[in-house]
Image (tube, rainbow, N blue to C red):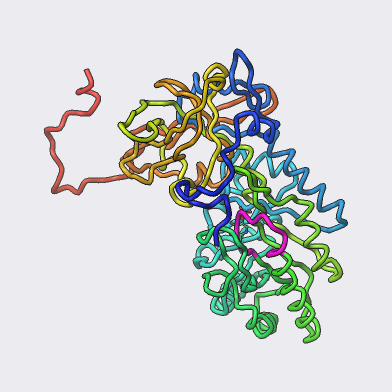
């Protein structure tokens, strides 16, 4: 099952027309178009950042992160729910993003030792970190125990036994939650649905009772509750409610069997608006938690990633060339590509595209294919998108790329990782220098027997 967000761009024949520039701006109050300075994020002209850092360039708005975090915690407080927020670091793991959210009070949900180190490096307290993930290495589990993470979400019988022996050997007690596979169809894109029995995630809900009891009897472990995460970009409350209902009945059964259950980790997955989806409001999520789990007398955790950061990010790009064809729309070739932003190629994701110049944006619309220069047909951002005429050198912003954007970048086609900037109030700063091209092969070595002494350094050839 696919949501509108995830339909391949060519597959949208029966949908509403793409939102117009005015609608995209109206639904994104942090963006505005100034007649002279062009597209602004908050008070900062995006052209100023592109002038300094070049393109492609990611831009993140710190104020948007803060206001979304506050909207989320506000909705939970309003519903009277004791909730701690563990930001899912994989959505955007930049240290500055973690610092902004950490300063707001967020903990973290991490899925690797690398993310765990990042979160701690950014100042998030280990006790406020949940370690999730379907495969954790012994080194990663040792790191988590040595740092004293607040909770480890276990995903299999094997992991329970392994963690017990590691923790006992280190003389630590691991607080664990069992991640339940509730067998729920979340209705999001197939590649980001995680709560069905055929998916690799979680423990079959029918095995939870026995494993919880087993874990309680093992050294080094303290089972504190249950966890669930059914998928991503979910824009209806129904799948959350179905999953939480399953958890509620498991909690009843666990307690009836003498188990202690003090916390429920409700996962992430809140959808956002990319095109014309509704997304899911924090209030709706709070309502689902309260309705299904509110009477259990437990503490809650949530693990939102995308919802917090997606709308806070943009990818700036410049038009390299416009390739007109005999038939069909022209190809607008950008200097950003699938190696920078993978979501359109990977999921057929739709992202809004706005020119940075007000004069360009005001031009008449016609269909265009917006692509990158990478040698893959799948290197496409939009097909038959209604856009004003774009010429070489014109700049565009690809919207809502704060989640699963820069973190999924690669250097395919020997394209260095793009620069990144953070806007905070009226200020902005470069938060990641564009990767120097030499960095692409810095860690490579050529074996002795393939060395050549006669090669002049590359710089000497550039005269
Ligand atoms: C990816 C992930 C999340 C965050 O998902 P979003 O859709 O970005 O909110 C939360 N919890 C776990 C375990 C995850 O793997």
* Quadrant in the picture for the C terminus: top left
Q: Is residue 245 left or right of residue 381?
A: right
**x, y percentage for residue 140?**
53, 62
Magenta stretch: dominant secondary structure: loop
Up/down of 47 relative to 2, above or below: above
In the rendered structure, which segment of residues is drawn in magenta? 229-240
Up/down of 225 relative to 49, above or below: below
The one nearer the camera, 54 or 11, is: 11
* Quadrant in the picture for the N terminus: bottom right
**x, y percentage for residue 314?**
56, 34
Q: How many marks?
A: 0
The one nearer the camera, 454 or 439, is: 439
* Residue 28 figure quarter: top right
Q: Is residue 332 left or right of residue 242?
A: left
Q: Please report the residue visible at 63 percent of the width from the left and 83 percent of the height from the top.
A: 207
**x, y percentage for residue 380?**
41, 41
Q: Is residue 104 left or right of residue 269?
A: right
Q: Residue furthest top?
A: 36
Quadrant location of ligand 1?
A: bottom right
Residue 167 belongs to magenta span: no
**x, y percentage for residue 281?**
74, 50
The one nearer the camera, 213 or 342, is: 342
Up/down of 73 relative to 113, above or below: above
* Residue 194 figure quarter: bottom right
């Amino acid at each position: 099952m696919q949501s509108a967000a995830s339909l391949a761009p060519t597959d949208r024949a029966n949908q509403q027309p793409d939102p117009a520039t005015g609608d995209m701006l109206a639904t994104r109050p942090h963006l505005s178009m100034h007649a002279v300075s062009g597209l602004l994020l908050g008070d900062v002209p995006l052209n100023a950042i592109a002038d300094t850092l070049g393109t492609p360039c990611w831009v993140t708005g710190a104020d948007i992160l803060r206001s979304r975090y506050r909207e989320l915690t506000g909705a939970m407080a309003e519903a009277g729910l004791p909730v701690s927020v563990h930001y899912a670091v994989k959505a955007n793991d930049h240290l500055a993003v973690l610092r902004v959210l950490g300063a707001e009070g967020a903990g973290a949900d991490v899925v690797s030792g690398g993310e765990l180190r990042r979160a701690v490096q950014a100042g998030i307290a280990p006790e406020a970190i949940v370690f999730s993930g379907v495969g954790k290495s012994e080194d990663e589990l040792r790191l988590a125990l040595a740092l004293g993470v607040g909770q480890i979400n276990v995903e299999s019988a094997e992991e329970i036994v392994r963690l017990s022996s590691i923790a006992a050997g280190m003389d630590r007690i691991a607080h664990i939650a069992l991640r339940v596979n509730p067998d729920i169809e979340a209705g999001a894109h197939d590649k980001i649905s995680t709560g069905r029995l055929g998916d690799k995630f979680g423990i079959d809900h029918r095995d939870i009772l026995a494993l919880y009891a087993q874990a309680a009897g093992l050294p080094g472990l303290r089972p504190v509750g249950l966890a669930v995460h059914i998928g991503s970009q979910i824009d209806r409350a129904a799948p959350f409610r179905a999953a939480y209902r399953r958890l509620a009945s498991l909690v009843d059964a666990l307690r009836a069997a003498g188990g202690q259950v003090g916390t429920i980790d409700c996962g992430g997955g809140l959808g956002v608006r990319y095109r014309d989806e509704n997304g899911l409001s924090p209030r709706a999520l709070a309502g689902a938690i309260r309705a299904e789990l509110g009477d259990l007398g437990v503490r809650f955790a949530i693990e939102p990633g995308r919802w917090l950061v997606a709308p806070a990010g943009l990818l700036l790009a410049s038009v390299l060339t416009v390739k007109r064809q005999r038939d069909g729309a022209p190809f607008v070739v950008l200097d950003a590509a699938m190696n920078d932003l993978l979501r359109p190629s990977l999921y057929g994701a739709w992202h809004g595209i706005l020119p940075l110049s007000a004069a360009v944006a005001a031009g008449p619309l016609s269909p265009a294919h917006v692509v990158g220069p990478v040698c893959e047909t799948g290197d496409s951002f939009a097909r038959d998108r209604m856009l004003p005429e774009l010429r070489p050198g014109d700049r565009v912003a690809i919207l809502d790329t704060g989640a699963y954007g820069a973190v999924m970048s690669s250097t395919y086609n020997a394209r260095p990782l793009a620069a990144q900037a953070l806007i905070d109030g009226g200020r902005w700063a470069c938060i990641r220098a564009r990767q120097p091209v030499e960095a692409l092969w810095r860690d490579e070595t050529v074996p002795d027997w393939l060395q050549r002494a006669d090669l002049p350094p590359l710089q000497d050839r550039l005269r």
